């Protein structure tokens, strides 16, 4: 057998239907496009609605919402406090040993357990962390955020950066 002897299986290759070749058959004259109108004369873009604002432009594109006043905390767990060996934990002391970045707000979370008395000063603490710290004989002091009880300054707002 040679390459020129190869043929597709019988019935697997179907010839393309030739339309608009005279009125003698099914695909003659209007070639299956009906009579008159825009679609009979040329192609129309997919999604074109005759000049009406199309659906893909009518629906909103923006998904979700980014709160410009969101307060981001850096989490510190109880096991991290236990390993640090500090008796007094505050954002400044955590910054000095490299556990918290510059200008970050600290939130203490309850993963792990404390075996010693620790004084914790943080911007926020979970209920489980507070319970574990007080259960070990320590105290929790919530440090107020720099802007007080109101909402924080907006992030990424061009009007506030003047």
Image (cartoon, helix red, strand yellow):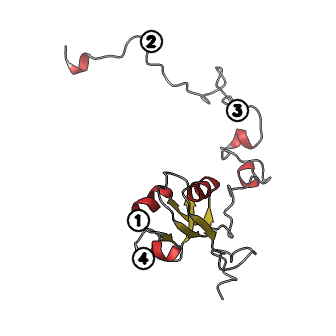
Q: Which is closer to the viewer, label 4 or label 2?
A: 4
Q: Which is closer to the viewer, label 2 or label 1?
A: 1
Cα distance in 3D space between marks 3 and 4: 77 Å
Q: Residues within 10 Å of mark 1 (few under 14, many from 20)?
A: few
Q: Residue at x 62, y 30 (%)?
A: 20
Cα distance in 3D space between marks 3 and 2: 28 Å
Q: Quadrant of the N terminus?
A: top left
Instruction: Tell which circle, 4 or 2, labels the residue nearer the N-terminal end.
Output: 2
Cα distance in 3D space between marks 3 and 1: 82 Å
Element class at badge 3: loop
**What residue is disc 4 on?**
96
**What residue is disc 2 on?**
11
Instruction: Tell which circle, 2 or 1, labels the residue nearer the N-terminal end.
Output: 2
Element class at badge 4: helix
Q: Which is closer to the viewer, label 3 or label 4?
A: 4
Q: Which mark is residue 33?
A: 3
- The residue lying furthest to the left in this view is 1
Q: Residues within 10 Å of mark 2 (few under 14, many from 20)?
A: few
Q: Which is closer to the viewer, label 4 or label 1?
A: 1
Q: Residues within 10 Å of mark 4 (few under 14, many from 20)?
A: few
Cα distance in 3D space between marks 4 and 1: 13 Å
Cα distance in 3D space between marks 2 and 1: 81 Å
**56 or 71, nearer to the observer:** 71
In the visual, does 115 lie left or right of 36?
A: left
> Where residue 92 appears, x then y in whole percent?
49, 77
Instruction: Tell which circle, 4 or 1, labels the residue nearer the N-terminal end.
Output: 1
């Amino acid at each position: 057998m040679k390459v020129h002897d190869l043929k597709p299986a019988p019935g697997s290759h179907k010839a393309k239907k030739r339309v608009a070749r005279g009125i003698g058959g099914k695909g003659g004259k209007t070639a299956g496009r009906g009579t008159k109108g825009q679609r009979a004369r040329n192609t129309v873009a997919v999604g074109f609605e005759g000049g009406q604002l199309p659906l893909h432009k009518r629906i909103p594109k923006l998904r979700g919402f980014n709160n410009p006043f969101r307060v981001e905390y850096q989490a510190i767990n109880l096991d991290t406090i236990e390993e640090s060996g500090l008796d007094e934990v505050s954002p400044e002391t955590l910054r000095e040993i490299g556990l918290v970045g510059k200008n970050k707000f600290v939130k203490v979370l309850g993963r792990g357990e404390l075996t010693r008395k620790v004084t914790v000063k943080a911007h926020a603490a979970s209920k489980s962390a507070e319970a574990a710290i007080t259960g070990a004989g320590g105290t929790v002091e919530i440090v107020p955020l720099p802007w007080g009880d109101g909402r924080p300054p907006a992030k990424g707002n061009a009007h506030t950066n003047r």
